[in-house]
Image (cartoon, helix red, strand yellow):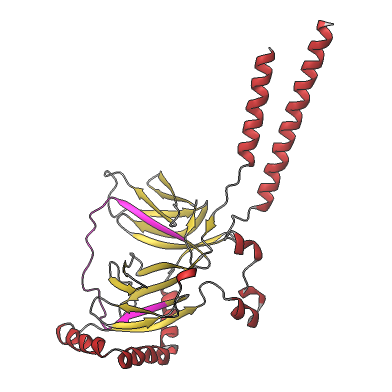
Amino acid sequence: MKIFSFFFYSIVCLVATTLNAPNNVYASNNTIPIGFQFFTASNIPIPNETFQLQLDNEVKYLTTRSDGLAFIEIPSKNIKTQYTLTTSNQQTFTVEPNKLYQLTSSDNQLRNTPTINNQSITIDVLSKTYQPLSNIEVKLLAQNQEFIGKTNNDGTTTINIPSNIPKDTKFNVTINGIDTHSTISIGEDKYYTFNSDNKSVSPFIQDSMQHTQLDNNQQNQQTQANTLNNSNNMNSNQSNSNNINSNQNNSQTYQISVVKNFLVPDSNHSTQNNNKEKKPSSETKSLPETGQTSSHYFTYIMSALLICITSLIFFIIRKKKSQNHN
């Protein structure tokens, strides 16, 4: 009986400790992102577009996802003020960290429609500051079936779909139990953003209204785009010759524009704007937590009560046993 009581008490404490264990999600706070989104002139995302970014001592090759997006995280300690981007048609642009760029093709339609050869779906989950989130649960639902994955340290999860499910099946996407009100198909890979403040989850590009907004932003930034192009043309004669040769062989060209500045809020920039631009101190250390504070408090209280009640029962039994022996 004594061994059983001790065993029971240990199990209860273990369960309480497990309930009390944190289930937070984190984003790296020692990297700075740069984002790129590729569109046709008619606002169609360009998937599988490979381009390169010249870093310190290496060239990083990036490929856009099904939504035309690609992000790269650069360690803060190695950050530079400018980098050189080279597109597939050998155009070069100067880009800066902590910004989201849009590259718009001169073509109205996709040149190559990607062939789906895999039976999986890949989802990248980013924080509101466009940094990868780990430990995020992603659930796909279709045909009364659900498939679950959890993001790794890179914010990515790949979920394999059984071969008996048709490739044209549309899956509803939920992230951390929140419906994104969007669908994804087999073979696609997309970015989703997760806002820890209000638990909102949404695909990065939602609908045609979002596309129009990007177009307007692109027109507003046309002067800046021309400045970027002129800067590249003035600083690199080699790039000019490559562009001329490329344009002769390939009529496709890109225009670049800045869609968003300060993906990660800058302290100086935040001070000049309203408090909504500022990062909470809690996010600075562990960006972002799940934010389910009330749920955590309830778990703490229930765990404490469970241990107290079990301890009380345990000591009452021991006291009665000692009295019986006497």
Q: Residue furthest left?
A: 249
In the image: residue 192, left or right of residue 244? right
> x, y (%) of residue 268?
61, 80
Q: Is residue 72 magenta?
A: no
> Viewer-proximal residue, 181 or 119?
119
Q: Is residue 115 magenta?
A: yes
Camera sees residue 54: yes
Camera sees residue 197: no
Which span is picked out in magenta? 101-125
Rendered residue at 42%/54% (across/down): 172
Asked where in the image residue 281 lies, by quadrant, the reply is bottom right
Asked where in the image residue 288 lies, by quadrant, the reply is bottom right
In the image: residue 237, left or right of residue 261? left
Q: Quadrant of the C terminus?
A: top right
> Viewer-proximal residue, 160 or 275?
275
Q: Residue furthest front?
A: 57
Rendered residue at 27%/43% (across/down): 164
